[in-house]
Each structure stands twice: as C-alpha cells, then as structure tokens.
C-alpha cells in the first residue's frame, strides 16, 4: 500500500512527543513490510528537506504555521494516483485533508482534542477563539472521516465534536533493556517526566512535592524534560529540593524511572499518557490527575488517580510515597498497550478496510 502521512512534526523536531513516537513506530513497521510510506512534516533546523529513515521517506517543508499549506502543495505536485491512503495526523490544528485530497481515502489519526490546552498555551482572547470557534469548526470537517484515536476518553471527546466513525487502536511499548536492574533510591524519590510547558503543569507536581515534604523531609524530586517553564521553575526550587536534569538519553531516563518510587503526572489533557505506561513497565507506580487520557493509562497500570488539584496530589504523595519508599510498592503493569508491531498491524488493517470501502 502507498501511504502519505501528514504530521506537522517528525521525530527529529525539538518539540516531538508521543504522537511522533507513535507515527515513527508504525511507519517503520510498514516500511519493513514493503509498504511505500512518506511522512510530510515541517522543516527542522539541521535536518535535510528529504531523506530516507528506516525505509520511510521523510519530506520536510514549511514552519509551524505554513506546513499545512506546504503539505497541500506537495500532495498536488504528485501524480493523481500516487497514494492509496492519506493519514492525517491531527495535533490541535489539522491539515484539513478532506477538503483537498481527491482520489485516496483520508483517515484521521487524532490522539486527543485540545480543549483545555488552548487556555494554557495562548492569551485569553486567542484561547477563547481557538477553543470555542476554531477547534469545533476544524473537527466538523472530519465528521464523516474514518478516525483512529488511542483511548476511550479521546473517543468520547471526539464524539462530542460530532465525529462518529472513531475506533481505538492503543499505543505501543517496547522499552530498551536496561544493562542492569537498578535498586530503588534509599530515600523517597518522586519524578516528573515531560515537557516543561503550561499544559503539562509541572508547577503542580513541584508544588505538591514541596507541600508533601513535611511527611518525608528527606525526600527529593527529579525533573526530566525541557521547555518554556524551565528557567522559572529552576529559580523557584533549590537544588536541595529538586534536581532539574533537562532532556536526557533514553538509557538514563529509564534508569531514573526504575529507581524512583513514584511518577507524578499533571497534564490538563492527554491522549493516553505514555510515560505512565513506561514507568509501570519498570515497576514504578504513578500518581496523576483524573483528566481524559491519564485516567485511562492510570487505571490500566494500577496507578493512583486524584482530583486535579495540588492539594489532592500532595495528599496522595504524602500518603503513598513514604510506604512505597519503605518497600511496599504496589504491583503495577503496563496495561492497555500492545507491542508496536501489533499496533502497526492493526492500524494497517484499518487503513486497508477503509481503502476498500472507498473504492
């Protein structure tokens, strides 16, 4: 099958996240099985405009704002029957491929709706415009488009915007093997892992940790990730309280996850919450907010779900982490996910079904 994937970022982009991990993993599997796969994404400084990565053709052009126009130009420059399927990966602003793709079937891949994220990423007038005008209008264009998402929460949210043909195909997980199984830290240790941006609410995790230290004065916290809030957060917390590690290599990330006693997850909304699953695969429980996406991954992995407030999060940390640090870690498991090969196979079957129905 000939597949064009439109995703505004590819895995080399500095802001790449879970969506890019998903796209990279499934497209590599398809290419390995001799499918013709092209990813179109925005240009990245230091990366070529076109290259072959693990058998996948990656084409880069345009910026955060112009990549959508460039994708349309790229598609129209191809022969009419060049592709069998166009996979439109929606990250807040969609490519609106149903309006300009002719011939191939369009399938949308939508990890989550933005909704509350608008309020955390833009000033109030623009956030109101995005949340109440732009996003509903954009998503209405996909009302009749076959759509894939990654959790029951996201399927429910998409239904609220009028999307009816939505199936759930979960995320995948294949953690590299650690060279050795590290022991847990001798003192209570919690972690935050993710982009240091407003919609991830790392400040909530840090504030909850600080508030909980009265019950565990020797506790410490590790923060892994970078982003626009990093400078302010580093200023607000001393090194005695919190270690800011920045973006770290995969091996170090997994080592720290395995040594910590709990992962704190505080986003305003997620499609799933892959970090919860990664932590569970290493035996580390998560404490997180009861919001769409996270409630799915936390339930599947045996994590602790709390109302989305610093006070409730601090209370859970205070109640759970000292016991976990004393060796009473609960059994956790990376539930709700599949090996990436199975995810790719399921998604490919769905694409083929939609291609046949479209003929």
Image (spheres, rainbow, N blue to C red):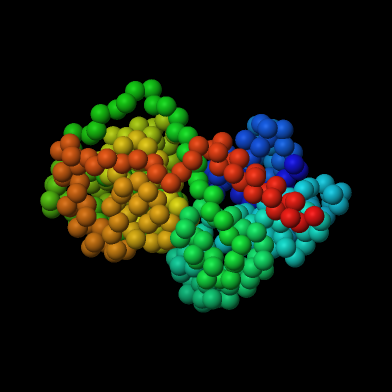
Residue 206 placement (x, y as % from top left): 29, 54
Q: Residue at x 12, y 51 (%)?
A: 215
Residue at 24% over, 33% down: 184
Between 97 and 253, the one nearer to me in the picture: 97
Residue at position x 72%, y 37% in the image? 35
Q: Quadrant of the C terminus?
A: bottom right
Q: x, y percentage for residue 236?
A: 29, 55
Q: Nearer the viewer, residue 129 or 150?
A: 150
Q: Kindly tell me whether residue 40 is visible in this rendering.
A: no
330 relative to 265, above or below:
above
Q: Please tell me in which quadrant of the rendered image residue 72 appears.
A: bottom right
The quarter of the picture where residue 233 lies is: bottom left
Does residue 244 sit above or below 123 in this rendering?
A: above
Residue at point 45% right, 52% down?
Answer: 272
Identify which residue, 206 or 325, lies in the foreground. Answer: 325
Q: Say whether residue 95 is left or right of residue 92.
A: right
Q: Residue furthest right?
A: 79
- Position of residue 1 measured from the top left corner of the image (x, y, whole percent): 75, 41
Which is more toward the observer, 234 or 71?
71
Q: Residue furthest top?
A: 179
Horizontal arrangement in the rendering, residue 58 relative to residue 156 (left or right): right
Q: Position of residue 114 (x, y in %)?
A: 51, 64
Q: How many marks?
A: 0
Instruction: Tell me if 59 is positioned left or right of 8 in this view.
Output: right
Q: Is residue 152 visible?
A: yes
């Amino acid at each position: 099958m000939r597949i064009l994937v439109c995703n505004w970022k590819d895995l080399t982009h500095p802001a790449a996240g879970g969506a890019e991990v998903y796209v990279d993993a499934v497209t590599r599997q398809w290419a390995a099985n001799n499918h013709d796969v092209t990813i179109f994404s925005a240009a990245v400084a230091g990366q070529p405009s076109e290259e072959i990565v693990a058998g996948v053709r990656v084409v880069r052009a345009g910026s955060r704002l112009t990549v959508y126009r460039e994708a349309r130009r790229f598609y129209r420059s191809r022969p009419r029957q060049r592709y069998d399927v166009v996979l439109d990966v929606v990250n807040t602003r969609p490519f609106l491929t149903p309006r300009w793709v002719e011939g191939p079937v369009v399938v949308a891949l939508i990890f989550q709706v933005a909704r509350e994220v608008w309020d955390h990423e833009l000033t109030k007038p623009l956030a109101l415009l995005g949340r109440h005008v732009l996003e509903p209008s954009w998503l209405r264009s996909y009302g009749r488009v076959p759509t894939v998402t990654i959790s029951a929460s996201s399927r429910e949210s998409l239904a609220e915007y009028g999307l009816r043909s939505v199936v759930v195909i979960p995320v995948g997980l294949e953690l590299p093997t650690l060279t050795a199984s590290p022991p847990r830290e001798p003192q209570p240790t919690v972690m935050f892992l993710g982009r240091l941006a407003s919609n991830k609410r790392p400040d909530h995790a840090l504030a909850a940790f600080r508030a909980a230290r009265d019950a565990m004065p020797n506790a410490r916290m590790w923060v892994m990730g970078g982003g626009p809030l990093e400078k302010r957060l580093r200023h607000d917390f001393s090194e005695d309280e919190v270690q800011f590690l920045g973006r770290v290599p995969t091996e170090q990330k997994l080592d720290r996850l395995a040594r910590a006693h709990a992962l704190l997850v505080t986003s305003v909304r997620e499609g799933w919450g892959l970090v919860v699953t990664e932590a569970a695969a290493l035996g580390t429980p998560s404490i997180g907010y009861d919001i769409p996406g996270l409630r799915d991954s936390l339930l599947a992995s045996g994590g602790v779900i709390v109302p989305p407030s610093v006070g409730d999060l601090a209370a859970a940390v205070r109640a759970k982490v000292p016991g976990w640090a004393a060796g009473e870690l609960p059994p956790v498991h990376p539930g709700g996910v599949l090996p990436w090969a199975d995810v790719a196979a399921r998604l490919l079957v769905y694409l083929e079904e939609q291609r046949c129905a479209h003929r």
